[in-house]
């Protein structure tokens, strides 16, 4: 095999998070640093309609305070989560007031279902009304999978490539990978990339009925949006981390998920010239699912030869499915913004679904 | 932006599951003949709907095509995609061993994912309550299962990527797949899309006033909208060098693509933004406007789309408009699969030498302007460069440029 120079890393300049910790990366970091018993929990308002399952809501996100009141009435909660996270992401990238780069900025959002709450609302209307098509026309767009990405573009005038990526547990990672490719291929200079998950009673019942969650794991909602940019447009704005690369794969049937994840990590490290022993922290993503935690840890051990310091985001926040990889990446950024050892140079984010979806992200701490 | 040093990427396999034929030969024959695939919808109860015509693939029998998947374990969209990919693999003459021993993957586009599965879940949740939903259906319902179905059916070992950018999703998928092959990330990638007819999408387009009265008439003065369709489509992309080495039939080369977003309105297209997307695609392909021989239009047949699309074409091509047609006139609006079917017929157009027709065209809309060459019946021609349009809900535009390999 020929040796190819690793591609130029991209810069992560911004991060917007809405999660069970509330709104913002600072609260997210505080929350993760608290001992488990001390973490406050928002139960959903309509708790009676939920199954016997812990559900961690992001609480009142106060959409109007972030984006203004005008035009928000017809939006659903999922779009609201996306808009708040995107606004925070652009602000943290020092791009809140800038307009000149918007035409060259795109969006890649991970979701595997779109808004189940909106879908259920419209489906109920089409099933119960005497005129089944008399649904609210301004609410219909909320039910399409690319609703969030389209609205994020509209509200922020982002005219670059606009992608919605569905990958199950690797949705956020697949969105980051799509974003990385779009920048490297010159379609845009910057991307807002991440993932979103919205909880509602119907979704919680689906998880409960499918018995996919490890006992004791909560279902969480949240959105993580990163601003990923070509180095050439960053200027003197601070860089939170460098995105070296991403990989995803699907291993269905009887193939080994452990080996699949290990191969994915090994290839990602070698493509970027990073030695396994230099990975100082891993943000694990599979700990919320029945029977997946051990597979993921073994995959990491197989690839690296050891298990680095581990951030266990699903255990701390709850299972956030399509938002998982983005919130795990945010957890690494939060850690690096604090007092973790400066010798910790590289971070790995892993995602894995029992259905065969595998993904990983490689980050470098800015020097 | 065209890059130096990337591999040339060609299309060597075409797979189609459509309402005018299963398999690329049947599909192409129907399109060339101007046959339409519309019929009364049977997948849901239409008794309280004023419009009941759809473009269902009513003779789809997954087991007749699939070799590995158990049809009971996958949703309708995933089965469409897997069957289309299986047909594409056969068409390309690649074995499962060749596919699984090389870096291989799939990129599938969709609008509504496993919408037929979600429809059944909704019926259960509204009927007996959300506490009664079928767990097996829950597992089938996420949209990423569509590409997972393709990878599982063919034993692909790499990426299974689903892009849910609505009605341009297959073009998004083709663009991303092109990059994967060009950059050496994979040696075989199946790209395309799948969607299923469902009550909720039918109701939504009806409510938005976008459903046609009877037939779909793109570019006609009496056009009144779309008819919702379904199906699956897959194209096999591989490096030119590999295709030549294994003696594959090469339909077309992927020359480049453009992607952008209107960022103005969720449902109304913006002609200026469409034009920027077309121009970006031509620039990416290194093709000048006068070198384009045919445009496979998005051509939904809604008054708004066709007007914006032709305005965009005029602003890019000036007075020399290439011939243009819309195959949606025959297969309906197949949502996330739509631009995939467009890509398939574009490949056949380049390889076999014809321009596909726009069926049902009675009187070209004079408001679309002069010197517009909408192909009314199949025309023999030898195009070298074809441009395939996909414009979507959410302002998600994607345009792919294909060329003949001589």
Image (cartoon, rainbow, N blue to C red):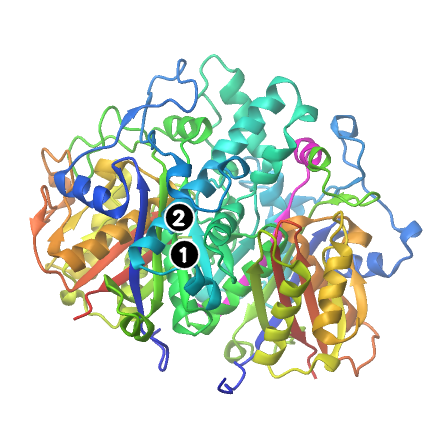
Q: Is residue B61 visible?
A: yes
Which quadrant is the C terminus of chain B positioned in?
bottom left
Q: What's the residue at 53%, 16% (across, down)?
A: A128
Q: Chain of mark 2?
A: B
Q: Is residue B120 left or right of residue A286?
A: left
As for residue A203 lying within the magenta part, the answer is yes
Q: Quadrant of residue B272?
A: bottom left
Q: Callout 1: 10 Å neighbours few (<14), some, many (20+)?
A: many
Residue A215 falls within the magenta-colored stretch? no
Q: Which mark is residue B173?
A: 1
Residue B230 position (above or below residue B271): above
- The boundaries of the magenta stretch are A187-206
Q: In this rendering, would A139 be left or right of B3?
A: right
Task: Classify mark 2: helix, strand or loop.
Answer: strand
Q: Is residue B49 left or right of residue B128?
A: left
Q: Residue A353: x percent and y percent?
A: 65, 52
Q: Which mark is residue B193?
A: 2
**Residue at image coords 52%, 44%:** B143
Query: Could one spot residue A84 in this view of the protein?
Result: no
**What residue is rendered at 37% in x and 43% in y?**
B232
The quarter of the image holding the N terminus of chain B is bottom left
The percent coordinates of residue A77 (x first, y second) are: 62, 40
Quarter holding residue B304: top left
Q: Are marks 1 and 2 in contact (CB under 8 Å)?
A: yes
- Front residue (pair B173, A45): B173
Q: SS for tag 1?
A: helix
Chain on which label 1 sits: B
């Amino acid at each position: 095999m020929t040796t190819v120079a690793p591609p130029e890393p991209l810069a992560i300049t911004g991060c917007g998070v809405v999660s069970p910790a509330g709104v913002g990366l600072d609260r997210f970091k505080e929350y993760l640093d608290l001992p488990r018993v001390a973490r406050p929990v928002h139960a959903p308002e309509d708790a009676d309609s939920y199954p016997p399952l812990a559900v961690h809501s992001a609480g009142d996100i106060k959409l109007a305070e972030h984006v203004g009141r005008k035009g928000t009435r017809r939006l659903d909660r999922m779009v609201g989560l996306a808009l708040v996270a995107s606004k925070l992401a652009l602000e943290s990238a020092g791009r809140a007031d800038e307009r000149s780069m918007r035409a060259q900025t795109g969006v890649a959002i991970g979701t595997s279902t779109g808004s189940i709450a909106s879908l259920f609302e419209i489906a109920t209307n089409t099933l119960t009304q005497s005129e089944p098509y008399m649904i609210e026309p301004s609410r219909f767009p909320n039910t399409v999978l690319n609703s969030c990405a389209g609205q994020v573009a509209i509200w922020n005038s982002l005219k670059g490539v606009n992608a919605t990526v569905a990958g199950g547990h690797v949705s956020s990672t697949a969105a980051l990978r799509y974003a990385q490719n779009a920048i490297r291929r010159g379609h845009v200079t910057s991307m807002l990339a991440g993932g979103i998950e919205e909880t509602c009673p119907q979704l919680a019942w689906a998880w409960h009925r499918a018995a996919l969650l490890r006992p004791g794991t909560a279902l969480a909602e949240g959105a993580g949006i990163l601003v990923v940019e070509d180095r050439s447009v960053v200027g003197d704005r601070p860089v939170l981390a460098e995105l070296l690369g991403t990989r995803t794969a699907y291993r269905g049937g009887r193939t080994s998920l452990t080996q699949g994840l290990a191969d994915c990590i090994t290839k990602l490290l070698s493509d970027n010239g990073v030695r396994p022993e230099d990975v100082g922290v891993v943000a694990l993503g599979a700990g919320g699912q029945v029977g997946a935690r051990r597979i993921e840890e073994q995959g990491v051990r197989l690839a690296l030869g050891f298990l680095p310091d581990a951030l266990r985001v699903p255990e701390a926040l709850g299972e956030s499915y399509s938002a998982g990889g983005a919130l795990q990446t945010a957890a690494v950024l939060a850690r690096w913004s604090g007092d973790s050892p400066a010798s910790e140079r590289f971070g790995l984010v892993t995602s894995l679904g029992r259905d065969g979806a595998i993904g990983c992200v490689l980050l470098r701490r800015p020097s | 932006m065209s890059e130096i040093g990337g591999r040339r990427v060609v299309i060597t396999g075409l797979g189609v599951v459509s309402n005018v034929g299963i398999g690329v030969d049947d599909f192409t024959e129907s399109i060339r003949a101007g046959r339409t695939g519309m019929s009364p919808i049977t997948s849901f109860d239409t008794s309280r709907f004023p419009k009941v015509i759809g473009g269902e693939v009513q003779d789809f029998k997954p087991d007749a095509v699939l070799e590995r998947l158990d049809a009971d374990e996958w949703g309708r969209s995933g089965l469409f995609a897997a069957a289309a990919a299986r047909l594409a693999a056969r068409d390309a003459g690649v074995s499962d061993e060749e596919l699984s021993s090389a870096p291989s993957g799939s990129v599938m586009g969709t609008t509504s994912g496993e919408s037929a599965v979600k429809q059944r879940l909704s019926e259960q949740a509204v009927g007996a309550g959300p506490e009664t939903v079928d767990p097996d259906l829950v597992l089938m319902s996420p949209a990423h299962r569509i590409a997972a179905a393709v990878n599982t059916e063919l034993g692909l070992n790499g990426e299974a990527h689903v892009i849910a950018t609505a009605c341009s999703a297959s073009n998004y998928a083709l663009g991303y797949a092109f990059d994967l092959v060009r950059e050496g990330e994979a040696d075989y990638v199946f790209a395309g899309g799948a969607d299923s007819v469902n009550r909720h999408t039918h109701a939504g387009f009806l409510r938005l006033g976008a459903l046609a009265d009877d037939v779909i008439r793109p570019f006609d003065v009496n056009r009144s909208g779309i008819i919702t369709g379904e199906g699956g489509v897959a194209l096999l992309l591989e490096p030119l060098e590999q295709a030549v080495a294994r003696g594959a039939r090469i339909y077309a080369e992927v020359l480049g693509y453009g992607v952008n977003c209107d960022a103005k309105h969720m449902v109304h297209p913006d002609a200026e933004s469409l034009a920027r997307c077309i121009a970006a695609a031509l620039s990416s392909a290194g093709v000048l406007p006068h070198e384009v021989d045919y445009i496979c239009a998005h051509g939904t047949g809604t008054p708004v789309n066709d007007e914006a699309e032709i305005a965009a074409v005029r602003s890019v091509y000036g007075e020399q408009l290439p011939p243009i047609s819309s195959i949606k006139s025959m297969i309906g609006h197949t949502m996330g699969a739509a631009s995939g079917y467009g890509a398939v017929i574009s490949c056949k157009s380049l390889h076999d030498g014809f321009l596909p027709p726009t069926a049902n065209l009675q009187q070209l809309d004079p408001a679309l302007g002069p010197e517009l060459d909408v192909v009314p019946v199949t025309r023999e021609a030898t195009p070298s460069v074809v441009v395939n349009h996909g414009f979507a809900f959410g302002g998600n535009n994607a345009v792919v440029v294909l060329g003949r390999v001589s």
